[in-house]
Amino acid sequence: MDGCKTFGPSYRTIVDVIVVTTVRSCPCWHEEICEKDYPAWLYWIRSYRFSDEFDGTVPLPRRENPMRPTSTLPGRKSNPAWALVFGLCLGGEVGCQSGSGIVFPNQRPVFEQGTPTAPRLTTRTVPESSQTAGSVATSAKIAVTPFPDSKIQQATFQDTDLDLSQWISLALERNPEVAVARREVEIASAKIPQVGSLADPMVDVVAWPIYPNVQQQAGGRMIADVVVSQEVPWRGKRESRVAQASGEVTRLQNKLAATELKVANEVRQAYIECWLASQKLEIAQNDRLFLEGLLDLAQTRFEAGTSGQQEVLRIQAEIGLNHTEQSRLTADRKNSLAEFARVIQEPTDFSHDGLPLSFDLMETTLPSWEEVSTQALAANPELQARWAEVQRDQWRVKESQLNYYPDLTYSAGWGVMTARRAISPTADGIDNLTAGVSFNLPVRIASRDAALRESQIQVEKAMREWERQQAEIQRDVRQLHAQLESLAAQLHQYRETIVPSLEQALEVTTTAYEANQATLSELIELRRELLKLRATQKDLQAQWQKSRADLYWLMAEGN
């Protein structure tokens, strides 16, 4: 009892709850005794000896203690088995308490707390999902955005009424690289509660069941000794480990976003290739109609005797060349559709005749380079992943600094005593209660210094990688923006001047040929030049679309 008073009411309450809960399940529990005099029964449990037998009537002979109130409760003999039961219950209670979650602060880079400084990204705007992954939850768990099944998963290539955004959604649902990235995020998220929890408590139970091979003390004979210990890291170590795991989740989530953007860009590029092949094939088909009309005109002139047969034969040769060109363009279109099917993860053959290959060929305005660069630096997931590495490694520096402090191990013991067969004349059979703390001595300074230097160098490396990635993004954005401006100017000239002028020249030459005022060679030459210019215009349009898709990729734009 004096030992319980030493540790205060909270410790005593815990012991009361554990002991009474255990004893209620024991065969020696008597409702009529305990319900009538519950405090006395609890006092008896904590203060008296264990017994091998319980007859319910014979009082226990013991050494009188004037400080202890008189009790008429029945006597008992020692039984070491109950000490084992009490020890296991006490260890289970401590384990349940130590397994509860700890409250961690939101993740912040170490330099914001006054430890190694680093430049702050002023234009960086982290998406909501990244902020959720980067923060440490109250229960040392992280809320990872689920990946629900989408209706687009049931879409196939027979559903040719899907637009580009739906094709991108289909590719994201099917792409194995995206699936692997999502599983990596889930794996990293599962590590957060692992690194944030305490180690399992240890229970040490020692019993002396055989007399006289027992330990004797001044207070009586030892029956059993139960010690429960719990290792607790120095304050801040678990928080830094959780912050590192959370930073890794943030990095992988940004990698996942980068992978999804890359897949979306691949879909756009393949879609543009399909559009380009279809447009060139359409140009060749229209040219075939023009040549057939020109062949009818040449045959009419030949029958009228106003031209020779060589014009008819030359036009027939041009039709043959057109047929060859259509065969090549048809093969190119099939290849582009096969690549599109690969990106969409459709392994089977399909028919794409009804695929709506159309989109806005030009935008009215192009954002300025400053706006594009600011957006790319603020939202690019690759850059955000690099920054997450910096934050993660800064928390490693924090942990390395905390490793100079020891880890503590708290322990509490219960020694079960009895005066029966005790050799000490002063034996009173009062149980022993002990409490202690142990800790490691962090004397291996050299290894800790090396670990700190390693973590600091890792932070410096991550910062250089982040700066390199930032410079590359700025360079790519500048190049793509300049390329888009140049392509826009060229397309304007082709659309407004070059192609319309040559179309008008071909129309005038065709009218002159009908009037026998122009030769067939002049007409064929203009037609070939117009075909090249139309194909070049389509190439420029496709190149403009591809560059714009690459720019949107860097800017982390949506579908």
Image: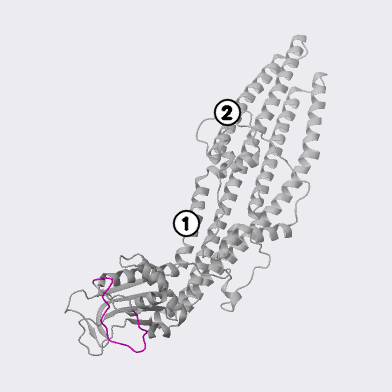
At x 34%, y 78%, the residue is 413
Of the two numbered discs 2 and 1 on the same chain, state the one appearing first in sequence.
1
Asked if residue 304 can be seen in this view, the reply is yes
Name which residue type carries label 2. Answer: Ser
* Res. 37 image quadrant: bottom left
Lateral position of residue 315 relative to residue 203, left or right: right
Q: Which residue is mark 1?
A: 187
Q: Could you tell me residue 21's position as x and y percent?
A: 39, 68
Locate residue 242, reporting x and y percent: 50, 67
Residue at the spot 51% in from the left edge and 48% down from the top edge: 179
Image-based side of 99 in relation to 44, left or right: right
Check disc 1: other Cα within 10 Å, few if <14, some if 14-19, many if 20+: few
Q: Nearer the viewer, residue 476 or 95?
A: 95
Q: Amino acid at mark 1?
A: Ile
Quarter location, residue 93? bottom left
Horizontal side of 487 relative to 50 (left or right) equals right
Asked if the magenta segment contains residue 57, the reply would be yes
376 in the magenta segment: no
Alpha carbon distance from label 2 to label 1: 39 Å
Task: Give the answer, above or below, for where 124 lies relative to 216.
Answer: above
Question: Which of 320/341 is in front?
Answer: 341
Q: Residue at x 53, y 42 (%)?
A: 174
214 up-or-down from 387: above or below: below
Q: Which residues are magenta?
A: 53-71
Residue 130, image x, y percentages: 60, 59
Q: Is residue 206 left or right of residue 99?
A: left
Q: Determine which of the numbered discs, if any, sits on residue 351 in the image.
A: 2
Please indicate, yes or no, whether residue 442 appears anywhere in the rendered image.
no
